[in-house]
Image (cartoon, rainbow, N blue to C red):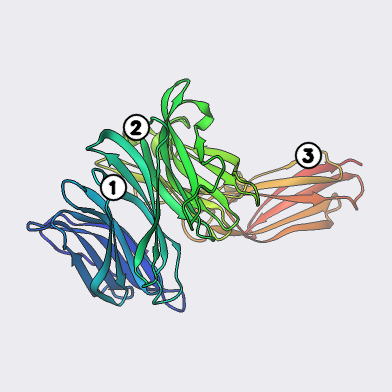
Amino acid sequence: GTLIWDSVYSNPGDDKGMGIDISLNEFGNADEVFISGYVTSPMSGKDFIVMKYNAANGNVQWQDIYNKFPGDDVATDISLDVGHAYVVGYSYQGPKLLDDIMIATYDKNNSNSPEVLIYNKPFTNEKPTEFILSDKSSNAVQKSRSGVISVTDGMVLEPRLSTYLTLAFKPDNNNKLDLAWSRVFRNGNSRTNVGTSICADKTGDLYVSGYTQLRHSLGNNLDFATMKYKGTNGQSGWDSVVKFFDFEGKGLDDKASSIKVNDSNDIFVAGQCEGSPNGFAFEKYKQHINDPNPVKSYDRKYNPYFLENDNYGILTNKYAKIELANDGTPLIVMMGWNENEAYWTAVRYDSNGDILYVINNPPGGTDGKIGLSERAALSKEEISEEIITDNYPNPFNPSTKINYELPEERIGNSFYDVKLTVYNVLGTEVASLVNEKQYAGRHSVTFDASNLSSGIYFYKLDINGVISKTKRMMLLK
């Protein structure tokens, strides 16, 4: 947590950083930092700004302010491949075209003369909500394929109407970005269709999610709406076209804000959920080979501390963001804020949707995690009470599952040295089930006693070599 450097861009107008990405060197360390956003000028209004920093010392290597258009130009996100920086946002193109999607592509080593592409759509405003490189180039010259999910409104032709707009871009024969295809989604007569998030699988197919208004028996509610497009042509990837999610069928508002797909083609969609109640929810879909539709695996809800405690006030804005661990399981960051305060909670889940650990940021600057090493004031016996163990079935024949839960740590390592051993009534070790480092959270292991005789056995859980818990179980054959 030691500050390495900071950098402030000074300008008398209103300036906001909106996107950041980092390039890595051959050793996997941060090499360059790219940021995007806008700066405000009394002459040209809001203008794209792109800056490149040295990651080691924060020195600005180059910057560009793009103000070739007379209206506002706002950069909302930036992504990097080996040779290029792709900056997406929107640009005001006049009273007929209004705000349109704009992508500026920079050579990472040169800010001069970026390639600029405008997606002109008359009589509507388009503002991107997420941008990705769907097929990232590993060649410093060749450009990547990319995808944008945008909110489109009908300010002139159809007031108060919004739709999903999904755009896919690819390099043409001259290596210039070109529109590959576009798709618009509107759910029947619904006037509220808001696309919020986009991701891609390893084949380059695009997945988008957001929320739409459904006519429900309990009223007109908003629900998650998720779809898949073939990366090559934009055709629907599912027979069902759209997967809707109304949490527990309660007819309350559910607004998806993040979608991710892992290498196993599991799809995760998360967002705020009034039916949880007033917290967050996420769902997981499984895609099977040759199955034209994904199958829902489960859904989960979570109410972070800042929504359950009245002391944190009314948080008018809520948002969830999914990130994936190396094993494809989700970490979901849930945020709530108003004009005066902001809070977040991060929840890590396993492949079955069970919580592995939770990190909070309550007032006072701590992350809210509680660990063994940071609570010396408590006795070993008191700490031991937080380690939960059980086994089922008990009595058993011939096997039983031993479950245990390791408490969260507040500071330092988030894993423990764990040993789980089984003994007979004479104190003789009959099985060593676990002897490794494990993260905080829930764990389980199966004890197979097929080769043992009936009787009483004990399993002993050792944590960091200083805390032990022992319980009894009975084998009946």
Q: Residue at x 79, y 45 (%)?
A: 400
Q: Quadrant of the C terminus?
A: top right
Residue 424 versus residue 102: which sits nearer the camera? 102
Q: Position of residue 308 (x, y in %)?
A: 42, 34
Q: Which residue is mark 2?
A: 191
The reply to whether dot 1 and dot 2 touch (C-beta < 8 Å) is: no
Q: Position of residue 342 (x, y in %)?
A: 32, 44
For badge 2, the amino acid type reads Arg
Report how far apart the C-alphas of labels 1 and 2 lie in the structure: 16 Å
Where is 399 relative to 421, above or below? above
In this rendering, the answer to whether 61 lies above or below 305 is: below
Screen quadrant of the N terminus: bottom left
Q: Name the foreground residue: 333 vs 52.
A: 52
Q: Mark 3 touching mark 2, by CB under 8 A?
A: no
Give the left or right position of residue 347, taking residue 341 as reference: right
Marked residue nearer the N-terminal end (3 or 2): 2
Residues at circles 1 and 3 in contact by the CB criterion of under 8 Å:
no
Q: Which numbered mark, 1 or 3, is in the foreground of this view?
A: 1
Q: Position of residue 394 (x, y in %)?
A: 79, 39
Q: Which label number is shown at residue 393?
A: 3
Residue 126's label in the rendered image is: 1
Q: CA distance from mark 1 to mark 3?
A: 58 Å
